Amino acid sequence: MTLIIGWIIIGAAAAMALTSFLSGRGAGGSTVVNLIAGVAGGFIGGYVFLLLGPSIVGEGPDFLFSLLGAAVVAVSSVLVASRLVK
C-alpha cells in the first residue's frame, strides 16, 4: 500500500514541477489536467515497472526500479498531456 502511495506522490510532484516549468516558458497546459496525467502516469508506470523489475534488475532492487519507472512515465505523460491540451 505504501508503494502505491509513493507512486502517486511521485506522479503528483512530477506534474506540479513540470507545470511550473512549462508555464514559465509559456508552453504549459492546465494544472488540473497535468496533475491527473501525472498521477495516472505515476501509478501506471510504477505498476508496470514493478512487474518488469524482477526480470530486469532482480529481486532486491525491484521496488526502486518501480519508483524510477513511476517518475519516468509521469514526466512523459505530463509532457504529452500539456501538448494535447494546449
Image (tube, rainbow, N blue to C red):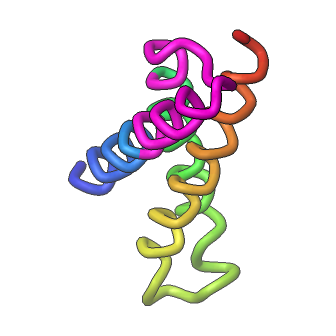
Q: Position of residue 80 (x, y in %)?
A: 74, 30
Q: Residue at x 77, y 15 (%)?
A: 84
Please tell me how many numbered marks the rendered image carries: 0
Q: Nearer the viewer, residue 70 or 35?
A: 35
Helix, strand or loop: magenta stretch:
helix
Q: Is residue 15 above or below residue 1?
A: above
Q: Position of residue 82 (x, y in %)?
A: 67, 23
Q: Is residue 78 above or below residue 73?
A: above
Left or right: where does residue 76 sit relative to residue 16?
Answer: right
Q: Position of residue 62 (x, y in %)?
A: 49, 77
Quick check: is 28 in the magenta stretch?
Answer: yes
Quick check: is 52 in the magenta stretch?
Answer: no
Residue 20 visible in the current orientation: yes
Range of magenta residues: 14-35
Q: Residue at x 57, y 88 (%)?
A: 58
Q: Is residue 71 above or below residue 64?
A: above
Q: Residue 26 occupies which quadrant of the picture?
A: top right
Q: Residue 52 occupies which quadrant of the picture?
A: bottom right
Q: Is residue 7 above or below residue 43?
A: below
Q: Nearer the viewer, residue 76 or 21?
A: 21
Residue sticking out furthest to the left: 2
Q: Position of residue 13 (x, y in %)?
A: 37, 44
Q: Nearer the viewer, residue 71 or 3?
A: 71
Q: Quadrant of the C terminus?
A: top right
Residue sticking out furthest to the front: 25
Left or right: where does residue 57 sit relative to residue 80?
Answer: left
Residue 43 visible in the current orientation: no
Q: Residue at x 22, y 53 (%)?
A: 2
Q: Residue at x 70, y 10 (%)?
A: 85
